[in-house]
Image (spheres, rainbow, N blue to C red):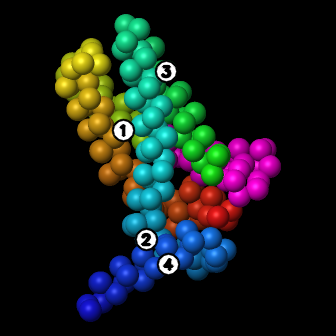
Amino acid sequence: MDHGTHHADTAHDHAAHQHAGHGEHDHGGHGGTSWRMAAQATLHCLTGCAIGEILGMAVGTALMWGNAATMVLAVILAFVFGYSLTLFGIRKAGLDFKTAIKVALAADTVSIVVMELVDNGIITLVPGAMDAHLDETLFWTSLLGGFVIAFLITTPVNKWMIGRGKGHAAVHAYH
C-alpha cells in the first residue's frame, strides 16, 4: 500500500467514524477534513437545493412566469429545502427547534449561497435555458449541468469551512 492510499483510507475511516455517531469531533483544528466528508456535506446540501430549485423552476415555467419570478421562487425553495433537510436531521438528535434552526443556518448558509450563485449563474449564461420549457432537453440539461458544476465548486468551499470548524462542521456536534 502506498502512502497516498493509506492516507485516503485513514481519512475515509475517520469520516466513517464521525458519521457513526461516536462523538469524537476533535479534528486537531479541523485540518484533517477529508474530501469525502466535504463531498458528503455538499451532496446533502445539493439534495435540498435541487429539490427546491427543480420545484421552483418547474412551477414557474409551468405557470409561464417571467424569468426573474421563476428564479426567485427557485432560490427561495432551494433555501427552504436545503435548510429543512438539515433541520429534520438535527431535530432527530433531540435539539430544541430554536437551537436546531441556529445550527441549520450555521451549517448550510454559505454552502447554499455558493451553490445557488453557481447554479443560477450557469442557467442564466446558457443561451435559451431561461426560456426553455419543461418538455425541452435544454431545460433539464442546463439545470442538471448547473448542479454538477455547483457541486464541483461548492465541495472545496465546504472542505475549507469544515476544516476551520465552520459550516457543516456545526452539524457534526449533534451526530
Query: Mark 3 highlights which residue?
Result: 73
The amino acid pointed to by label 2 is: Ser
Query: Mark 4 highlights which residue?
Result: 14
Residue 41: x, y in percent?
Answer: 48, 56
Q: Nearer the viewer, mark 1 or mark 4?
A: 4
Q: Nearer the viewer, mark 4 or mark 2?
A: 4
Quick one: label 3 or label 2, which is nearer the N terminus?
Answer: 2
The amino acid pointed to by label 1 is: Val
Q: Which residue is found at the position 29% from the left and 84% from the top?
A: 4
**Magenta residues, start to end:** 90-113
Query: Mark 2 highlights which residue?
Result: 34
Quick one: label 4 or label 2, which is nearer the N terminus?
Answer: 4
Q: Which residue is found at the position 45% from the left and 14% from the top?
A: 69
Residue 107: x, y in percent?
Answer: 60, 52
At label 1, counting other C-alpha atoms closer than 10 Å, the crowd grade (few under 14, some 14-19, many 20 or more) is many
Quick one: label 4 or label 3, which is nearer the N terminus?
Answer: 4
C-alpha span from label 1 to label 4: 30 Å
Say left or right for 97 vs 143. Answer: right
Q: Quadrant of the C terminus?
A: bottom right
C-alpha span from label 4 to label 3: 39 Å
